[in-house]
Image: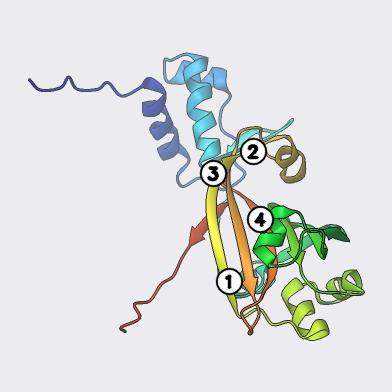
């Protein structure tokens, strides 16, 4: 006995219609109000709200308090390489910047100690930043680093790049890294720091960076906005 064909939800049909409507629109263009769209497509405002909500989550549309709903700019394509965020962005012609929230010293907890192969309670350097692309918050990053790193705040301010400061001022060259990528939904801190909605999709990336002697020197937690970020991994067969 064949299965009954599934009915496509109304909101999904409307979502695809709205996607087509804004496909060639200029970023920043306001779309009609929920009421106007409900009248135009002869549907309920609840259906319109759900369709718009998914398009916002996918990065097709954007919402801002007091501005309304608008066509979002294209997503940034971010290629994770063995370089800094600044270098990766520059290689793609993107203007990157950072807002430094904290440069301090902290004690290694159980997880950080295991990752960085140091005793629990060992002193680590902590760097917390908001990473921006073309002036827009893209990621919230907290890096934990081994070793005494005196005057790190000044060196970071001078170079604008943590990897550059580590290499030039401390002789620490990160030659290998392991990235772990997961998904999660935005919580209150993400909403406050990145200016996004509660429950918005995020990419959580942990990076463990190694020096030439295979010792781990960096353990970084980065949360990227899912609506503004496209992850690209480039691989090559070892036989080629």
Mark 2 or mark 3, which is nearer the start of the sequence? 3
Kindly identify which residue carries mark 4: 222
Q: In which quarter of the image is the N terminus?
A: top left
The structure residue drawn at horizontal position 34% and vertical position 77%, both measured from the top left corner, is 237
Q: What element does badge 1 sit on? A: strand
Q: Distance between the residues labelled 4 and 3?
A: 19 Å
Mark 2 or mark 4, which is nearer the start of the sequence? 2
Q: What element does badge 3 sit on? A: loop
- Location of residue 72 by image quarter: top right
Kindly identify which residue carries mark 1: 177
- In front: label 3 or label 2: 2
Q: How far apart are marks 1 and 2 (CA)?
A: 26 Å
Kindly identify which residue carries mark 3: 59
Where does residue 167 sit, x and y in percent of width and height?
75, 83
Q: How far apart are marks 4 and 2 (CA)?
A: 13 Å
Q: Which of 118 and 64 is in front in this view?
A: 118
The structure residue drawn at horizontal position 35% and vertical position 22%, both measured from the top left corner, is 9
Please determine whether, in this image, residue 227 is positioned above or below residue 127: above
Q: Distance between the residues labelled 3 and 2?
A: 15 Å
Q: Nearer the viewer, residue 146 or 30?
A: 146
Q: Which label belongs to residue 122?
A: none
Mark 4 or mark 1, which is nearer the start of the sequence? 1
Q: Would residue 230 be found to the left or right of residue 86 on screen?
A: left
Mark 3 or mark 4, which is nearer the start of the sequence? 3
Q: What element does badge 4 sit on? A: strand
Q: Which label belongs to residue 186?
A: 2
Q: What element does badge 2 sit on? A: loop
Where does residue 89 sit, x and y in percent of width and height?
63, 68
């Amino acid at each position: 006995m064949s299965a009954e064909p599934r009915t496509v939800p109304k909101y999904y049909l409307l979502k695809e219609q709205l996607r087509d409507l804004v496909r060639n629109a200029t970023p920043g263009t306001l779309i009609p109000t929920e009421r106007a769209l409900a009248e135009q497509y002869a549907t309920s405002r609840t259906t319109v709200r759900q369709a718009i909500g998914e398009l916002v989550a996918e990065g097709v549309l954007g919402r801002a308090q007091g501005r309304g709903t608008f066509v979002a700019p294209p997503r940034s394509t971010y290629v994770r390489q063995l370089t800094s965020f600044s270098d990766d962005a520059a290689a793609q012609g993107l203007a990157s910047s950072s807002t430094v929230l904290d440069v301090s010293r902290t004690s290694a907890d159980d997880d950080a100690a295991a990752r960085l192969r140091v005793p629990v309670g060992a002193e680590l350097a902590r760097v917390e930043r908001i990473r921006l692309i073309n002036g827009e918050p893209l990621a919230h990053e907290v890096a934990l680093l081994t070793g005494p790193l005196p005057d790190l705040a000044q060196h970071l301010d001078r170079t604008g790049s943590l990897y550059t400061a580590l290499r030039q001022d401390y002789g620490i060259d990160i030659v290998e890294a392991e990235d772990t990528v997961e998904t999660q939904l935005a919580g209150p801190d993400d909403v406050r720091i990145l200016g996004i909605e509660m429950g918005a999709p995020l990419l959580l990336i942990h990076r463990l960076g190694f020096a030439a002697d295979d010792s781990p020197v960096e353990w970084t937690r980065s949360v990227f906005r899912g609506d503004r970020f496209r992850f690209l991994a480039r691989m090559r067969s070892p036989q080629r």
